[in-house]
Image (spheres, helix red, strand yellow):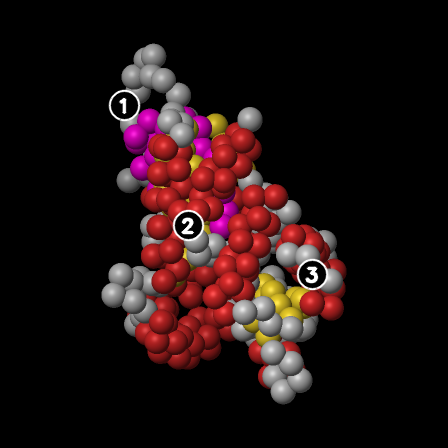
């Protein structure tokens, strides 16, 4: 039996008022810290052509013939070491961020609901878009959890929306946030957290701002991620009253043998450990810890993007 090209539409009600939602999208996480769950997650993640730009046939042979036979068990042990009673830390904090942003809208009497989705894993973007459509939302603002744009992350989130749209007859009105690496509310939130850390632990000689790494070749191919990371760092340094010598930018999490953005975080800290003291709790661009204090400003900024 042939499958219809479009998913079945939910019941339509004439005169239905437009409804607005924010879909807050993060990278993803396995469902459990087990080899089988990691195999599913890594299979989806590493099959994305935005993530690995190797000719597909060659990469599929490597991925399914080698990586997915070896890496899941090793990665499961690392996930198990950070897994919490509530589940994956990434999922827990993403859900809390979405709930806090939803509460901020409600406090302002804005008729906007916030849901979260994972680009890889659960809840999937397709399932959340299906749910929003079923509930009658007609306008969706897609907000990646990545302040700095990268084709490996931000564009992949947008791809998932486009793919969902290809099987949907009546599409919601979409808006997309490409980046907010230099937005005053974002910089202010980061600065507030650094100052809070300094107030509790004292200010060190140098602040390390560690961003997630990507292959260096993406920079030469036109990806703005590297430049946007450095702009975030410069604006944060200015907000904190730091000179260029008071902070440094590094990049963490490498995969494979190709050259990634430098300097690398771990060897940089090891090499300089004996020379000076650092703020080792790094300022990570994805998870803002103080949700209640910062989400009110974020809500105003995100809603303003709708126009």
Across and down, in percent, residue 299 comes to 47, 37
Local crowd at mark 3 within 10 Å, few (<14), some, or many (≥20)? some
Please report whichever mark, 2 or 3, sits nearer to the chain's N-terminal start.
Answer: 3
The answer to if 132 sits in the magenta stretch is: yes
Asked if labels 1 and 3 touch by Cβ distance under 8 angstroms, the answer is no
Report the mark closest to the observer, 2 or 3. Answer: 3
Q: Is residue 61 above or below residue 162?
A: below
Asked if labels 1 and 2 touch by Cβ distance under 8 angstroms, the answer is no
- Residue 274 figure quarter: bottom right
Residue at mark 2: 291
Residue at mark 1: 11
Residue 106 visible in this rendered orientation of the protein: yes
Q: Give the range drawn in magenta.
A: 128-146
Asked if labels 3 and 2 touch by Cβ distance under 8 angstroms, the answer is no
The residue sitting at 36% across, 17% down in the picture is 17
Q: Is residue 166 above or below residue 187?
A: above
Viewer-nearest residue: 72 or 232: 232
């Amino acid at each position: 039996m042939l499958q219809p090209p479009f998913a079945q539409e939910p019941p339509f009600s004439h005169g239905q008022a437009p409804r607005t939602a924010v879909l807050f999208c993060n990278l993803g996480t396995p469902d459990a810290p087990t080899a089988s769950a990691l195999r599913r997650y890594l299979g989806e993640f590493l099959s994305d052509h935005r993530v690995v730009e190797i000719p597909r046939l060659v990469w599929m042979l490597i991925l399914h013939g080698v990586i997915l036979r070896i890496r899941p068990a090793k990665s499961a042990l690392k996930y198990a070491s950070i897994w919490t009673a509530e589940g994956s830390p990434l999922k827990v904090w993403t859900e809390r961020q979405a709930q806090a942003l939803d509460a901020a809208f409600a406090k302002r009497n804005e008729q906007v609901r916030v849901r979260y989705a994972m680009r890889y894993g659960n809840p999937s973007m397709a399932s959340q878009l299906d749910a929003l459509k079923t509930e009658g939302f007609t306008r969706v603002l897609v907000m990646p959890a990545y302040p700095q744009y990268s084709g490996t992350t931000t564009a992949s989130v947008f791809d998932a929306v486009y793919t969902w749209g290809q099987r949907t007859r009546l599409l919601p009105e979409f808006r997309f946030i490409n980046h907010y690496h230099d937005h005053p509310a974002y910089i202010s939130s980061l600065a507030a957290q650094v100052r809070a850390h300094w107030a509790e632990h004292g200010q060190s000689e140098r602040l390390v701002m560690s961003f997630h790494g990507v292959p260096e070749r993406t920079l030469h191919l036109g990806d703005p991620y590297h430049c946007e990371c450095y702009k975030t760092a410069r604006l944060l340094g200015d907000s904190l009253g730091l000179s260029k010598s008071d902070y440094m930018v590094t990049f963490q999490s490498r995969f494979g043998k190709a050259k990634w953005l430098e300097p690398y975080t771990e060897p940089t800290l090891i090499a300089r450990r004996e020379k000076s003291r650092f703020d080792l709790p790094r300022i990570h661009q994805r998870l803002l810890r103080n949700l209640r204090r910062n989400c009110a400003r974020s809500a105003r900024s995100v809603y303003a993007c709708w126009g």
